[in-house]
Structures are given as C-alpha cells and as structure tokens.
C-alpha cells in the first residue's frame, strides 16, 4: 500500500450541527472537521451547495495540531425561511486527491406558532401618505434663478450702457457729435491691418454722417467718387461754399480709406493721424460754410431735441424699473437660499404665526402663586364667577395660536374627624383624571371632535416637573369649509393646594407652532418665593 493511499484511508471526516430542529429564520451552524496526517493535503469545497438552505457566512479553515495528526475545521452559517422537512446536502472534502463524503442530515424547520388567546391580532394598518419634500427641488430652482438673474443682470448692464450712449449721442448736435467721435479716434492704437480697417471705417462714417445730417447730402449710400461729385456740384451752385483744398484733402482721405478697406493697405501712423485732422478740418469748414438756419428750422430742431430728451427720460425710467425688478428678485432669491424658502415667503405674505414669531414678545407675571412667562402678546385676564379660579388667555380656538393659562386653587376645607382617610396616591390619580376630563370637556364645549390624546411626565427647561397631556383634535374654524386638524398641549403643574394648567393649540400643519411652543416653555418659570 502506498503512503498516499494509507493517508487517505486513515483520514476521518466528521459532520456536526448544533440542532436538527429549528424555527423559521433561525441560524443553523454546520461544521466540517477532518482528521488527517500532517503531510496530507486537505481541500474543502470552494463553492459549497446547501440548497434549499441559504448560506449566510463561512469561516476560514481552522487548523489544530495534535501529537500525530492535524484537525482541519471549517464552519458554515445557514438559514431557511420556509417550514418543512429538509436534508442538508452531502459535502465533499479532498484529502490528497481522494474524496471524503459527509453524511446526509435531516433538518426540521418549524413555523412560529402564535397563540391567539394570549396574543391579540390587529388589522394591517393602511398606508400613510407622506408629504413630498420639495426642499431639494426648491434649492435647485433657486440656484438656477440666481445664475439666470446674474446673466440677465450682466446683459442688462451692457445693453443699458450701450443704449444710454446711443441716446446721448443722438441728443448731441451733429457737429459736436462728429468732433467728439474724432477725438475718440485720436486715442486709437494701430498696429495691425484690421485695426487700420476699423479706424478708417469709423473715420469715413463720421464725415459721411455729418454731411448727410448738416449738408443734406446723401452721403452714407454714396461711393467716394459720388460723394465728391455731389460736393463739387453744391460748391458750383453756391449752396455749400467749400474751399478747393478742403475737397482735395477729403478726396485723399477717402482714397486712403478705400485702399485700406479693399486693398488691405497699411499706411503709416503719421498718415492715419493726418487723415483724421483732415476730416476734422472738413467738418469745421462745412459747419462755417453752411447758411444760417431759418427760424422755422430752429424751431423744428428744438422740437426734435425735446422729443429726443423725452424719449431718453422714458427709456431711462423703463431701464431703471427693469433693473430694480431684477435686483429685487435676485435679492429675494439669495435671501431664500440663506434663510430658506418658506421663512422668506411667510415673512413677505405675513403668515400669522410667522408674524408672532418675529414680532415683539412680552415677559409678564400672572396668577397666584405667580408664574413668569414670555408670550407673543400679553395674555388677557378672563373674569370668572369662580373666585378661586384665575384665567388668562390669548386668542380663541379660531386664532392661529391659542394660549390659556388657568390657576385653580380652591379654599381648603376643614378636615372632619369623622371623614375617612384617603390614600394620597389614589387622591393624586383621581385629581389627575379629573384634570384630563376637564381639558377634554373644555375642547368639546368649543366644538372640537376626534380628540386623541396622550399623557407623559416631563420637566420644563426651568427644572419644574409637569404632567403633559397632548394630542390632536378636529375643530370647525370660521371661514373653513371643513374641520381643521389641530395639535394641542396642556402642561399641568399640580400642588397640594391646587393646579396650574397651561394649554396651547395651533394647526397641526403650522410650521411655526412648535417653535412658539418651545419658546414659551423656555421662558416659563414658577416663582416659589416672593
């Protein structure tokens, strides 16, 4: 017999399982352990199949050395979610190439038995509608508006300045406008052919526009030769008394301009400067050569200037209002991004409880024993025929926020020696139930229905313990077609002599109700010593 065959035969495979009877969903631990010689090569299955059980986890191989052999152990965690009888599949382990097969194990998976006599059964709760959260969408929209308004603002500023310049130039008389444009050309820096081309285009446009507006010559649509011919004809007819040298210098400027614009010529800087001076001389001499305007022409010119001035003022108003609207919207959007959409919106539209939150609050002292509390408005004292009872109130159940502060300290009754002794704990329970019933009665007397309430023991921020009765109710508010779901909280401060009850109520969907309630409680303080 070979050494490998002997080692294979001497190897022992054991299977262990922690239970053969489990509940649905209970973890089952399955262990493979093989005893082999120290020189043997042991291989566990790389992808073990335990169907119909699910494999939760498998541990690494644990090797333990004994005196003459090794123990190789591998553990698996299994689970099954259907009840019934099952068999764990046989697993194969290789020892020096020879297989060892684990034995088949039967498993019983039991269902979870519910004792309906001990455990109550409840109906399946209906789906609860959850309000959609639009905060992320609103934030994206607001950021988009900011980007859009900034772009619109930049375009607005550019177009406004451009239009302002155009209107100002149109209001200037033709001569002053031409001289101003020529002065602007004096500061031009020329180095490339395209710059010379723009320079001469502007230069010839100045003189052509001036001649068309002042000398009434169709200059803008005429070629250079046609323009010079028209000037010659007006000189010969005596309409425009220009010097021959002036026309000659203008001819030279137009020829240089045509060479630059159409033949891509690049003149010297000195030539460009001299051409500008020549055009300026043409404009000035044309101004002197023109006949004096008649009174009718002066009136027409004045009327035209007045029309331009009114048009400019109107456009300035339009541009100013548009700019103000853009700035206001941008400011509003930025405020919404900083402080939130709803707080800014509610502040602008004066949401009732938002007004109470942002308004002035008043710190006052009420009742006996006295209590200090800060409220949006001073509580109004309610007269009552019951002398020991004091009541202070803000608003009604129809108000956005209702506050009621009552002090009930009846006169102590003399103890009769024959009166039975009452357990203090039982007395406190009866007193607490009586107070809860009084709260329910006060709500029902005002028309509230569907009153759901809970009670809890709390400690207000000042450190005073209190019993809190809170919940929801439906109240028929005025000008509302349906009943409004409201939240209420009643804080009960009980003493041997009597009780102080602080009742607060507001609409359940009000975003600022809890904020106001928290602020009131933070300022509430009982004055124990005067």
Image: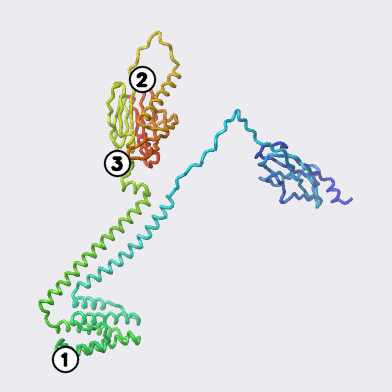
Question: Residue at 37% across / 11% down in the picture?
Answer: 415
- Packing grade of label 2 (10 A; few <14, some 14-19, many >=20) is few
- Packing grade of label 1 (10 A; few <14, some 14-19, many >=20) is few
Residue 216: x percent and y percent?
A: 19, 82
Which residue is situated farthest in the left direction here? 295
- The numbered disc on residue 497 is 2
Mark 1 or 3 closer to N-term?
Answer: 1
Name which quarter of the figure residue 88 lies in. top right
Mark 1 or 2 closer to N-term?
Answer: 1
Whether tag 2 and tag 3 are in contact, CB under 8 A, the answer is no
Disc 1 and disc 3: Cα gap in Å? Answer: 85 Å
Whether tag 1 and tag 2 are in contact, CB under 8 A, the answer is no
Nearest the camera: 524 or 68? 524
Q: Secondary structure at mark 2?
A: loop
Q: Is residue 405 above or below residue 257?
A: above
Callout count: 3
Residue 296: x percent and y percent?
A: 11, 76
Nearest the camera: 510 or 336? 510
Q: Is residue 278 above or below residue 168?
A: below
- In the picture of the structure, the residue carrying the numbered disc 3 is 359
Name which quarter of the figure residue 503 lies in. top left
Mark 2 or 3 closer to N-term?
Answer: 3
- The numbered disc on residue 394 is none
- The numbered disc on residue 236 is 1
């Amino acid at each position: 017999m070979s050494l490998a065959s002997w080692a294979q035969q001497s190897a022992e495979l054991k299977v262990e399982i922690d239970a053969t009877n489990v509940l649905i969903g209970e973890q089952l631990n399955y262990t493979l352990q093989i005893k082999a010689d120290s020189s043997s090569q042991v291989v566990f299955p790389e992808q073990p199949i335990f169907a119909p059980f699910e494999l939760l986890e498998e541990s690494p191989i644990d090797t333990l050395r004994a005196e003459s052999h090794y123990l190789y152990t591998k553990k698996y965690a299994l689970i099954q979610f259907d009840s019934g009888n099952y068999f764990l599949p046989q697993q194969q382990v290789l020892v020096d190439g020879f297989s060892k097969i684990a034995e088949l194990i039967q498993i019983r998976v039991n269902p979870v038995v519910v004792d309906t006599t001990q455990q109550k059964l409840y109906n399946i709760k209906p789906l609860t509608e959850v309000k959609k959260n639009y905060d992320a969408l609103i934030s994206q929209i607001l950021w988009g508006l900011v980007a859009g308004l900034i772009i619109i603002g930049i375009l607005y500023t550019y177009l406004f300045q451009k239009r302002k310049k155009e209107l100002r130039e149109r209001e200037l008389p033709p001569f002053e406008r031409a001289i101003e444009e020529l002065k602007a050309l004096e500061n031009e820096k020329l180095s490339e052919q395209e710059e010379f081309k723009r320079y001469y285009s502007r230069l010839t446009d100045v003189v052509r526009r001036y001649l068309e507006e002042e000398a009434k010559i169709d200059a803008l649509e005429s070629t250079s030769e046609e323009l010079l011919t028209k000037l010659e004809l007006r000189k010969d007819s005596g309409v425009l008394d220009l010097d021959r040298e002036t026309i000659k210098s203008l001819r030279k400027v137009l020829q240089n301009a045509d060479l630059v614009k159409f033949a891509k010529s690049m003149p010297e800087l000195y030539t460009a400067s001299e051409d500008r001076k020549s055009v300026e001389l043409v404009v000035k001499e044309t101004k002197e050569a023109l006949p004096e305007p008649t009174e009718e022409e002066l009136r027409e010119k004045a009327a035209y200037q007045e029309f331009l001035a009114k048009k400019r003022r109107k456009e300035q108003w339009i541009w100013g209002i548009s700019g103000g609207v853009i700035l206001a919207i941008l400011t509003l959007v930025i405020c919404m991004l900083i402080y939130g959409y709803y707080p800014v919106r509610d502040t602008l539209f004066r949401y009732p409880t938002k007004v109470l939150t942002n308004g002035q609050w008043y710190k006052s002292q009420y009742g006996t024993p006295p209590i200090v509390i800060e409220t949006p408005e001073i509580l109004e004292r309610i007269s009552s025929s019951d002398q020991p009872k004091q009541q202070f109130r803000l608003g009604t159940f129809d108000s956005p926020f209702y506050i009621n502060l009552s002090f009930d300290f009846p006169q102590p009754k003399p103890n009769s020696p024959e009166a039975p002794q009452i357990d203090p704990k039982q007395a406190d329970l009866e007193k607490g139930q009586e107070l809860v019933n009084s709260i329910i009665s006060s709500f029902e007397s005002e028309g509230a229905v569907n009153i759901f309430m809970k009670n809890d023991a709390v400690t207000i921020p000042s450190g005073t313990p209190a019993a809190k009765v809170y919940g929801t109710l439906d109240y028929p508010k005025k000008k509302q077609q349906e009943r409004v779901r409201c939240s209420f909280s009643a804080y009960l401060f009980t003493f041997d002599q009597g009780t102080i009850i602080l009742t607060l109520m507001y609409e359940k969907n009000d975003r600022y109700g809890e904020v106001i309630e928290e602020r009131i409680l933070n300022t509430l303080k009982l004055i124990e010593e005067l």
